[in-house]
Image (cartoon, rainbow, N blue to C red):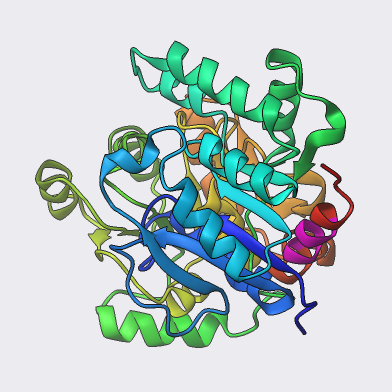
Amino acid sequence: MQSGINILSIVPYSILPAQSGGKLTIRELHHYLGKICIDNVAGTTDNEDNTQYSFCLHKVLSDSKLRYLPYSNTGKLFKLAKENNVQYVHTEHHYMGYTAMAVAKKLGVPWFIRSHNIESERFRSIGKSWWPVMRWFEKSMMQKANGIFFITQEDADWAMNHYGISPAKCHIVPHGTPLVAKPSNHLQAKAELGSSLNIPTGVPWLYFLGALDYQPNKEALTHILNDIVPLLNAKGFKYQLLIAGKGLSDELKQQINATENVSYHGFIPVLDTFLNACDIMLNPVMTGGGIKTKAVEALGYNKLVVSSQAGAAGLIPSVCGNNLQIVKDYDWNAFSTAVINATTSNPSIPDSFYDTYNWDKIAANVLAIMQRTKV
C-alpha cells in the first residue's frame, strides 16, 4: 500500500530491459519502492516503456554522455519534482550527484546516493588509469549527500575510513530477492529443463550466470574453464555445467563447445525455471567490487554457492547457513573439492536470509531512512 510519499529517483542509464546484475538491482529496488510510495524515476530515453513495474518512469534524460556534466538537466528535473510534490531526491550512483544536490537544494529536501560499490576502487582493480579522479569526485559527492545507501557493510566501512563519511549517513541497502521462503519445486524444474535442453538430470548441475562481456565475469568464467573444470574432471566428478548470460566472446564460446559436459545457453530473460533447476552456483569472481547480485539470487533459490573470498564480499554468512561455502582466493584445488563436497549437502537456507534480503523489507527500510533524515 502506497504511503503518499513522493520521491525523485535519478537513474542515469537504461534499466529496461535489465540485462545485468547492476541494472536488475536498480529495477527491483524501484519496483518495490513504487509499491509503498510514489517513486518518480527520471530515466534515459533509451529505456523501454514501463508496462509491468510499479515505479513511474519519466524518460527525461538524454542517452548522451553530456547528461553526466555537473548540473546538467537541473531545470528539467526540478520541474518534474515540483509537479510531483517530491519530498526526497535519490540518485543511483554518484555520477549525477551535482544535479541531484542542486534539485534537492532548490526543493529544500534531503538527497541520497545509492552506492553500488566503491567505484574508484573498482576502477583501480580493473586497471582504469583515471581512478584517482573518480576517487576525488566520489568522495566529494558522498560528503555532500544527506545519506548514502551502500550495498555492503564493507563498502560503508571503507567510505567511513577513507572518505571521512559520518557513520550516521551510512546505511546498508543490499541487493535482494523477491522470494519470502525457499522454493520447493527443484526436481520438477530440473526435469522440465533437462528435457528441453536434452541434458542428463541424474548428475549435479553446476552453473555460472552473469553479463559475460563484463570483465570480472569474463575472468571468472575463464577460471572456471581453465582451472576448475580440469580439476573436477581429474577427480572423476560427474556433472553438467551450464553457462548463461549475454556477451560471451567467440573465443570462450568455442572453448565451451569443445569442453565435455559444459554448455552455453545465452541470455535467459526469465530465470525462475533455470535457477530452480540448478544445484550449485560457481562464484570464482576476483575483481569488480560490490556484492555479487547473482549470489544473492542463488541463495534466495536455496542453491549451494561455492565462492571465492572476493566473490563473497558483502554477503552476510551468518544468514546464509551452510548454503554458502567460501574458499581462499585462487586456491582452485580447494574450490573444486568444495564443489564436490557440496553435492553431499542438502541445501537449507535459513529463514533469517529472507528477513535480511527480501525486497519488500529492503524497500520499507529505504523509505524509513528517508523519512527520518533531515536537511
Q: Does residue 215 lie above or below 149 as drawn?
A: above
**Viewed as shown, does residue 231 lie left or right of 97?**
left
Q: Position of residue 309 (x, y in %)?
A: 60, 31
Residue nearest the viewer, comparing 56 with 229: 56
Q: Viewer-proximal residue, 170 or 251?
A: 170
Left or right: residue 282 compared with residue 352: left
Task: Quadrant for residue 367, please give it.
Answer: bottom right
Residue 250 place in picture, x, y as percent: 10, 47
With 59 as the anchor, is 292 left or right in this view?
A: right
Q: Can you say whether 54 is above or below 125 in the image?
A: below
Does the segment drawn in magenta span residue 366? Answer: yes
* Residue occupying the point 43% across, 73% down: 271
Q: Which residue occupies 63% across, 42% down?
A: 113
In the displayed structure image, the side of residue 151 where residue 298 appears, left or right? left
At 35% from the left and 73% from the top, the residue drawn is 269
Magenta segment main secondary structure: helix
Magenta stretch bounds = 362-368
Is any atom of residue 373 visible in this view? Answer: yes
Query: x%, y% of residue 340?
Result: 52, 49
The correct choice, above or below, for 318 with respect to 219 in the image is below
- With respect to residue 255, does 125 lie above or below? above
User: Which picture quadrant has residue 244?
Assistant: bottom left
| Residue 259 counted in the magenta span | no
Q: Is residue 240 visible?
A: no
- Classify the position of the C terminus by image quarter: top right
In the depicted view, which residue is nearer to us: 244 or 105? 105
Total label count?
A: 0
The image quadrant where one finds the N terminus is: bottom right
- Residue 318 screen position, x and y as percent: 82, 46
Query: What residue is shown at x 56% (from left), y 35% (from top)?
Result: 117
